[in-house]
Every structure is written in structure tokens, then in C-alpha cells.
Amino acid sequence: MPPFFRLIACCTALSGQCIAAESESVYPTKSIRMIVPAAPGSGPDIMARIVGQKLTESLGQTVVVDNRSGAGGVLGLEVGAKAPADGYHLIMTNAGAQTVSAGLYPKLPYDSIRDFAPISLVALAPNVLIVHPTLPAQSVKSLMALARSKPGELSFSSGGNGSTAHLSGEMFKLMARINIVHVPFKGAPAAALGVMTGQVALAFPNIPPALPLIRSGRLKALAVTTLKRSSALPEIPTVNESGLSGYEATAWFGVIAPAATPAYIVAKLNGMIQKMLQTRQLQERIASEGAEAQGNSPEQFLALIKSDIAKWTAVVKQSGARVD
């Protein structure tokens, strides 16, 4: 190559590097939109507001929470998948929206893996089996006995088809060999209200939105869905230790972005989120909501998403769960 053209090529390469370096140093220069595929007051919404506030402080730009609930998170994730991949559009996803829906819906308007760039896991949390305090079943065993005595008469609510609350109930129904009916509501708060008002007998919501109602006595917690007890409800046993051996369902929350989001932005946000999750203040704030702060790398987060899709797809097939 002639010297003149080598010089042009070199300058072009250096220019590209300078632009990338400059972009990385100045990002972000405006507010960031965090899409939440769930209703206000839900677990994903609570986590989005906790993380959004900290990112606002760290980045110097406002993180605006944008709730887009519906279809078990499908509507919100579709908005997120089609948003500009510019670092100014993030999504606070969760296990239900990202992985359960992939196995439950025969056709989605996006691909749960290819259309998103994982940034970091934020928190792990059990779901919690709740009933109205007056229900004549004060343990998992007595609830199963009641359901067997009234096949098809007891119903359970969820914040929508495809949520972990939905599939936690389907897995409970499958493993306990009982016939209970799923009733989807518009969001986790509405699903909990359905139990409080007696519209349904039970539910398996994320702990964060249910915790205040449990602590006030308006709902009774019978068990948590993880293998380990929750630090927020240490007196409440797990479903596994309450007579349904092998039962386990873990909800999680994490930040993702549209697939083509620049790698340097993903890396910068991952580093900031990991750092904030290691602070005692944020760990205690998340723990107060019944969850456990849990950051990881984009690669580890992607592996979790893939493994959960496989798990929940199997539960969907075995239970015969369907979109109501």
C-alpha cells in the first residue's frame, strides 16, 4: 500500500478509536429510560426503582422507570427489544418475563436470548405461598388436603400468564397432584388483593410486593418456594420442608438492554451495578424487600437465563400450563 494510503488508513483507525474512547468517557449525556415489564408495585418495579436511584446518583443522569405491564411481561419485553440500542434504553427484566414466557407462549414477538444483551443479575428472591388468614388451611400439608377434598374448587392468582407466580402454582399443582385453577390478574399487587378479598384462595407472588401485607397480618404466608428460608421471613418454612420434597422455584431480577447495545456501555453498566450491589446499604435495602443482592457478569447472567428457559419449559410441558 502506498505511504499516502497507509497514512489515511492509520488516521481512520485512530479516529475510530478516539470516537469510541470519547463516547465511553462521556456516556451518558442524557436521561436513561428503564422499561419494567410489570405493574407498579410489583417485584421488578421495586427493584427498578432501587437500582434506578443508585444509577442516577452514580451516572449523574436521571434513570426514568417506564412500566409496560401485560401478557406476563411479553408486552414490556417487546418494547425493550425494539428500543434503540444506544445505552439509553434498559430493561429491568425478571425470571417470569424472560424465561417462563419463552416456554409458555408458542410464539413471541422477540427472541428471549438473541434480542437482548444481558448486563447484570440484581437480586434473587423466593416466591411465597400466601392464603387469606381465615382459609381453613394453615400449613402446606393442610392446604394440599383441602385442595384434594375440593378438586377444581380452589383457585390461585398471579400477576399474569407467564410469571413465576403462575408457574410456581402450576408446579405446586403438578407435584402435589391436586386440581387448582389459575386466575391471572393485571399485576402482582392486584393478584395479592385477590387473595385478600377472597376472590381466590391462594397465590405465589414474589416476596417484595407481598411482604407488607404479610407483616400486617392481612395475608398469611405458609411457605417460601426456594430450598433455603428467606431472611425476610425466617420463621416461614420452605415448601420443600413442608411436605413437598424437591419443590423449588426462584425468582430473580436483572438488567438487560437491546441486543446491539455497544459492548463498552454494557461493560460500564455491569461494573457500576456490581459495585453498588457490594455496598452494605444496597444489600440491606434489597434484603428489606425480601430479596438477596446478587450481581454477576453478562456471561453468567446469560447462562442463568438459558438454564431457566430449559427448566420452565419442562414445567410447562409436564403441567400442561397454558395461556388462559
Image (spheres, rainbow, N blue to C red):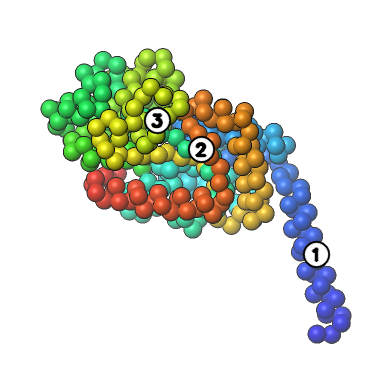
CB-based contact (under 8 Å), mark 2 and mark 3: no
Marking on residue 15 = 1
Q: Residue at x 47, y 38 (%)?
A: 124
Between 53 and 235, the one nearer to me in the picture: 235
From this viewpoint, is residue 53 visible?
A: yes
Give above or below for 76 relative to 284. Answer: below
CB-based contact (under 8 Å), mark 2 and mark 1: no
Q: CA distance from mark 1 to mark 3?
A: 55 Å
**Label 1 environment density (alpha carbons within 10 Å; few <14, some 14–19, many ≥20):** few
Q: Give the image location of residue 245, x and y in percent.
A: 26, 38
Give above or below for 51 relative to 16. Answer: above
Q: CA distance from mark 2 to mark 1?
A: 40 Å
Q: Please give the residue where the numbered disc 2 appears in the rendered image.
A: 123
| Mark 2 or 3, nearer chain start | 2
| Mark 1 or 3, nearer chain start | 1
Q: Please give the residue where the numbered disc 3 appears in the rendered image.
A: 229
Q: Give the image location of residue 282, x and y in percent.
A: 60, 31
Q: Give the image location of residue 46, x and y in percent.
A: 52, 30
Between 277 and 195, the one nearer to me in the picture: 277
Q: CA distance from mark 2 to mark 3?
A: 15 Å
**Label 2 environment density (alpha carbons within 10 Å; few <14, some 14–19, many ≥20):** many
Quadrant assignment for the C terminus: top left
Amino acid on which the number 3 mark rests in the picture: Arg
Q: Residue at x 57, y 50 (%)?
A: 297
Quadrant assignment for the N terminus: bottom right
From this viewpoint, is residue 50 visible?
A: no
Q: Which of the 4 quarters of the picture holds residue 157? A: top left
Q: Secondary structure at mark 3?
A: loop
Amino acid on which the number 2 mark rests in the picture: Ala
Q: Secondary structure at mark 1?
A: helix
Q: Secondary structure at mark 2?
A: strand
**Label 3 environment density (alpha carbons within 10 Å; few <14, some 14–19, many ≥20):** some
